[in-house]
Image: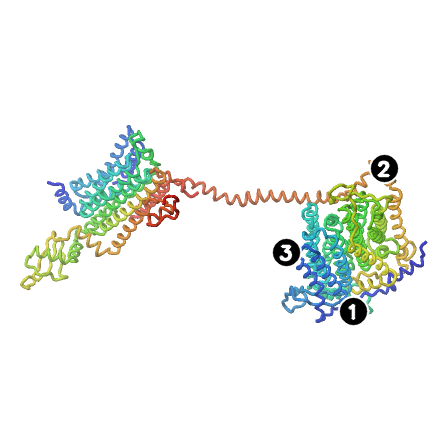
Amino acid sequence: MTPSILYTACIASAIGLYLLARSSNGPARGIGTLIGLGGLAYLLVGVMGSSEGGTYTSILPLIFGIIGVMAAVRVTTHRRPVFAALYFVLVVVASAGLFLLLQAEFMAFAIIIVYAGAILITYLFVLMLAQQSTTDDSDSGASWYDRTPREPALAVLAGFIMLAALTQSITEADGQAFMKQSIEKSSQSSTIAWQNLERLPKQLTRAAKDVQPDTKEVISGSLTPNGATATIKVILENDQEATLTLPASSQPANNQNVGLALVADFPVSLELAGVILLMAMFGAVVLARRQIELGEDEARELAGMQPTTQRGGDE
Amino acid sequence: MLNSSLFATLSSVSAGDGHAETVVSAIPEAARPENMTWAGLILLLPAISAILCGLYACLGIKNRLPGWTTVLALASSFVVVCMLYAGHEPGQPVVIHLFDWIDFSWGSKGAFENVTANFALYVDDLSLFWMLFVTGLGTCIAFYATEYMDEDRGKGYSRFFGAMSIFLLAMSALVLGDNLVMLYLGWEGVGLASYLLIGYYYQKTTAIDAAKKAFIMNRIGDLGLAIAIWLVWFNFGTLEYDGLFQALNLYLPMAEDGTLAGTQMGDAPLGWTAYLIPWFLMVGAFGKSAQFPLMTWLPDAMEGPTPVSALIHAATMVTAGVYLISRTYPIFWLEMEQGGYALATVGWIGGFTALLAATIAVKQYDMKRVLAYSTISQLGYMFMGLGVVQTFGACFHVYTHAFFKALLFLCSGAIMHGLAGQLDVRKIEGLRMAKGWKVVTWTMFIGALWLSAFPFTAGFFSKDEILAQAFVQEGPGFRALGWIGIITAGITSYYTFRVWFRVFGGKTLRIEPGPEHHGDASSFHPHPPGWRIKAVLIVLALGCIAAISSGYFGIGHWIKGMVSNSSASWGMPLHWHEGDTPFFGGDPHVTMYYVSGVVGLLGLSIAFYFHLYNRKLAITLEHAIQSRMSIRWIPRLLEKKWYMDEIYNATVRIPTWLCAKLLYLFDRLVIDGILVGGIARIPMFIARIFQPLQSGMLQGYATTMAGGVSLIIAWIIWTMSKGGG
Amino acid sequence: MTLLAVLAETSETASGDSRMLTICMTFSALIFVIGMFGFLTRRNMIVMFLCTELMFQGVALAMVTFSRLHLDVSGQVFVIFILTVAAAEAALALGLVILLNRRRQTLDVGAWSEIREC
């Protein structure tokens, strides 16, 4: 892919995004959509052309990606924050689809649960708390600061310089060569997955029992990866040794791999993440708490004590 | 008629055994006795008194305790001076070391290798001579002031006597100090005391202005003195008199018989800076002694209480300049021997000031101002004496002048005190007829006689010593200087008796009350002075009369001995032999008695005619002068003091002010505006370029950052793809 | 054929497909850039934070793609930490938003522009 095509595509997308950001409706919006989509298509065509692979397998990621990008554009351009938040859910779902295609099943569902389920609900709550009333604003029910973008030209410039740079680094010959090299290297040796299996003894035993129900115990350290399959030595019920061949399906699943990496490889980071979350909770509590100035008598009353000043005449 | 033989006798007595035999010898090295530290009481007693007065002021004491403390301290100080004098061996200086003050030394600690100025007393005949009348008069005047300042008891009484004590302390340090730094300390100390006392009535603007004027004028002179002191160290390597005189002895060598054998230079010839010392010393002396052109502060200093005028601004402090030059006379002499004109300048400035001040005094109406100008005039005589190489005459005149001028001031103070501040000679008449004013009348008469150099008074003898020497000494125009002196003597006589005849003479008693009297003028009665004022006046009058004896009975020898046994001996008349320089065909001293006597009587009689005998004629004459355009500026010029203050204002003050304004503008526009402000503005302008970035808008910052990150990423990727990864 | 089955089959066959990975990376860059654009242009504080979440999403997608590229789960672990930080940030940021909104009764970030330094 020649850089000029890439740059042209980036510029077209940038202009489309700019027009979309500038006007909420009218012909400019339509033109912006068209130019943006055209730019996006041009970009994707360029990207497709610069890489090798089956066209069929590229269709699903293209669909998810286009949905995600269009939803993302709507997040940034929609006049009403609630709708922006909802479009964000769409972005999350689309990227979860991409995650699935990338064999990251655990992460796909995790982001849907955490983002779409938890974080976005918080956003919506806050929006409802903060957005007091939009009825006074007759124009499509949005506040003025939601209708008027700030310096979209500069933002588009900054963003799409970055986009051009990033996409060029992805699509240029060197990048593609590096990618192909990495893929070959990783597909030739699927040893990592087998090593992970060896670190999960119960899983290993279960996998062995699936192949040979008589397995009593697996001899540790005997797993030998052999491409998609692997051999292990086991002790059978009759105390005889046997060599079993494990199929590819015996490899640990994605969630198992992630869990193992988290607990075994990054335990300190995991702890730190926990601390961060705790601190964030404290911080949110402290920040959002409404501070009420109490008089001395009220404070004493709350503490269960007698007020200091006696009101005469009551008793 | 006066007997000429009497004059001849007098002259031979007063002028000494023989002019040619006057011995000038090297100044002997000072003795340093260990057991004389009691002399430090001279300084200690006024210091204690000053501290006590400060305490009294803090305690709010309302009785006369401060006054009596001061009188007691000064009297004790006087007694100590007398004891010192009694034990003093003539011609032998004594250094009494009190305590170390400034003492640095390096190298082998010789000359030029130390800066030593210890608190020590240099007691020789000159300093004793000065101290005797300083402490003596100080005691008398403090005694007088206990009554004079009575009305201020509880208000400024303690302050007044505290400042008086400070003055005596500083004056003693000035006179007795063993080195030039201590002299400078005292010099500044008397300046401070003078400032404090002139500004005693600090609620009067004129008093404050006068105090500031005196202080600033003196600063100009003090700068000269400070430079001179530095130059002395630079050239002679020492600041102590003893070392200085020993160094000077090398440059003023004696023949074997003690006479001066011409000047031969020492091993190392003196640099040209040594010959600048007299000129700077002169500036210092002129400042303190109110000589032209630094004279204008003294008349204004009369804003202070009258005892202060008497003590500080007539009798003692203003003679410090004479003392300074007498003390450092060898340096002047050295300069003269090298063909310089420092002494001649001193003489001419003195003569010029004498005439100028006398002419101003003629047309003044304020009694104290007349006396102030006469003080300047008489100080001019003293400097004339120093200039024509007659230190004896100058010191003699200091001595007599101290007495009669203090007396005159105290008398005018008594008048002012009794007449509610009235000092205008036009508004008082026939005071001698008022009850209780006899003592004042006749003591003031004595003072006036002495001031006008009436024949056979002490002032007559001392003045003639100076005038005669002017005709004898060879120098640039000294003869003309002598004539100026004689004319001034006549004018002096006139203006002195003008005051006396106006105030005390006349057929009727007529007094207008002064500004301090509140109420009906017709009910005003002058209240006569009390016994303490009278006692002091009588004592001083007796002192004046006693001073005559110095002209007759060999006490002239006493003063002469005192002067000739000190560093001032270099200025004793040397070169005159009988018949050398005849004046009107005879001995100048003898002839001078006739001439100045006649001139003095002439002035007196003119005053008598116009101001007592025929006052109407004076008024007619006044009108006649005023009606003629061509000459009416003369009295006006005199009354306005030759427009001296106005000239200073135009020539010094306004240019200085303009200069200051210009410099201020320069500072504001160039330094502050262009240099400082301009440099400060550079970062401001640079900042203004980037200021829009600091808009406070979050997205502004974010856009900048994102743009920067984008560009960096683009640059990295571009270089990587160019460089082939 | 259910969607999941299609997905599973695709992912089986897509192993080692550089085109798919390239597309995923392009989309991650696009989402990141769009999120950045949104952060720079929107004035509503809540939407601005939403856009930062969008940028997180783009980065997470890139991480997962790298994980797939190298067959290493570290990339996915990284995404978990991103989620953690995003959650913490959302909690704090929304707390701040509520605080600021309470002060000025608006969500406009421009209302706070006078706390600049000059």
Q: Is residue A238 left or right of residue B477?
A: left
Depth check, front residue: B44 or A109: B44
Using the image, name the chain to which the residue with label 2 belongs: B
Residue on which the image places disc 1: B89
Residue on which the image places disc 2: B624
Q: Outermost residue toward the bottom? A: B34
Q: Secondary structure at mark 3?
A: helix
User: Disc 3 vs disc 1: which is toward the camera?
Assistant: 3
- The x and y percentages for residue B344 are 79, 54
Using the image, name the chain to which the residue with label 1 belongs: B
Q: Amino acid at mark 3?
A: Cys
Distance, label 3 to label 2, CA atoms, is 59 Å
Residue on which the image places disc 3: B58
- The x and y percentages for residue B350 are 79, 52
Mark before the other along the chain sequence, 3 or 2: 3
Depth check, front residue: B663 or B517: B517
Q: Amino acid at mark 2?
A: Ala
Using the image, name the chain to which the residue with label 3 belongs: B
The answer to whether residue B569 is above or below residue C53 is below
Other residues around mark 3 within 10 Å, as few (<14) / some (14–19) / many (≥20)? few
Q: Can the viewer see residue A222? A: yes
Q: Are marks 3 and 2 on the same chain?
A: yes
Mark before the other along the chain sequence, 3 or 1: 3
Depth check, front residue: B427 or C82: B427
Task: Report if the CB atoms under discs 1 and 2 are less than 8 Å apart.
Answer: no
Q: Is residue B685 left or right of residue B212?
A: left
Q: Can the viewer see residue B477? A: no
- The x and y percentages for residue B533 are 78, 54
- The x and y percentages for residue B377 are 80, 51
